[in-house]
Image (tube, rainbow, N blue to C red):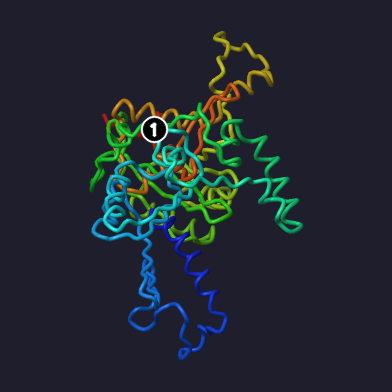
Amino acid sequence: VDRQSLLLFEKVLGYIFDKDPNYRPENKESKHKYICSGKDRPTKHELKLRNGSIIRCLPTGDDGYGIRGYTIDRLYADEAAFISEEVWASVTPMLATTGGSIILLSTPLGKENYFFRMSENKKFEFIHVDPDEVIAGRPEPQRTNLIEFRKDEKERMTKLQYQQEHLGLFVGGIERFFTKELIDAICTGKQHVPIGDKYQGIDIARMGGDETVLVSGDRINRERLIQFDLTIPEPQTLPDTTRLILKKDLLINHKKIYIDDGGMGVGVSDPLSENRQTRNKIITTNNASRSIDSIKKPRRIGLKRTITHTEVKKIPLLGEVMAINFRNLAENGKIQLLDDTRIRHSLRTMQCDYSDGKLKIYGNYDHIFEALKRLAYCLKDKSLKPFIYYG
């Protein structure tokens, strides 16, 4: 996606800028030793160098359409394991015409993708970065902080997830949560004018450059959900996010708004719960919460019993319940999503495994899916509209 593709471009631009210590950007007369200026000055997606080289930063899309028509002398593919097979089918002929080279950078994503196949291809030089060596080379207190962070991550993650995400290993047992066929089947929506009750799912950005996502959908006859809106604002403060949600609700008039109140989300869900416009619409959906409603209760009226700690621990986390609910609805043809590259990419990155005897669902670009699974939870909403009948 566009925002991710810019991260590597910014690193390249910063590296080249630092190569000329005499350059002073505040001085209009100052010219960089390597970077062109004037009409050829750097843009958001293109960097022209004085030696004639051009560095372009482009999102590929799902089929490589975004980079068709270019000749490539060297390709840097960031998070290569997450790029679809259709993109590689478009890119490799461009390299063949120039005899160009390719550099793949990525966290592993199982063994069923182009990145894994090339890691075993003898024509490629494979470099695995040992995270322990990276940590050992850090100065204090960063080194100690990283060691403690990895300990926490090892406790939080499943064994397979930790091996893949932190050790950079290709491991079996991790599966895609959504098949390519299912993603293609549900991501077909274009413009849609709502005709039923309108609902919203929201995922609030976490610390560290994540994205806030707002999605709205049209629930038809309590049986089907059609997404008609996707909003991903630029990084902003929590009060600005609150104002954006209120503005969107004024335009759309949602029946219910499902929002994560864990972590940073509480800074948005609390003021929305107190606002007259949205206080009766907000439903908090914390991934880490458990619902005791799923425990079978005695049928006889007046009979009480204590719910044990063991019973509570057996209740699945709400985050997993919402994810499974979304996939079940998708597999049964009850959800239609917008045909948007960002949505497809988010679904494609979602993985799951049972390595520790329990289901774990996760992804590297999961915030769009986090909002979508909350939106889909509206199909479980059984509330009725109040009616007044006159005789």
Residue 259 coordinates in the image, percent (x, y): 49, 43
Q: Residue placed at 29% from the left, 58% from the top?
A: 98
In which quarter of the view is residue 34 placed? bottom left
Residue 198 sits above or below residue 332 on the image: below
- Say which element carries label 1: loop
Q: In which quarter of the image is the C terminus?
A: top left
Where in the figure is residue 19, as x and y percent of width and height? 54, 75
- 383 left or right of 284 in image: left
- Comparing 120 with 286, the one in front is 120
Closest to the observer, 269 or 250: 269
Q: Does the image show residue 56? A: yes
Badge 1 is on which residue? 178
Task: Judge whether 72 appears above or below 384 on screen.
Answer: below
Question: Which residue occupies the extreme bottom position in the image?
Answer: 29
Query: Residue at point 35% right, 57% down?
Result: 100
Q: The residue under label 1 is which amino acid type?
A: Phe
Q: Which residue occupies 58% across, 48% down?
A: 266
Callout 1: 10 Å neighbours few (<14), some, many (20+)? some
Residue 44 image offset from top left, x and y in percent: 39, 68
- In the displayed image of the protein, which residue is found farthest to the top? 300
Q: How many labels does the image show?
A: 1
- Looking at the image, residue 339 sits to the left or right of residue 378; the answer is left
Q: Locate residue 169 relative to residue 232 in the image: left or right.
A: right
Q: Position of residue 38 (x, y in %)?
A: 36, 84
* Whether residue 213 is situated above or below residue 165 in the rendered picture: below
Q: Can residue 388 be seen in this view?
A: no
Residue placed most toward the observer, 308 or 274? 308
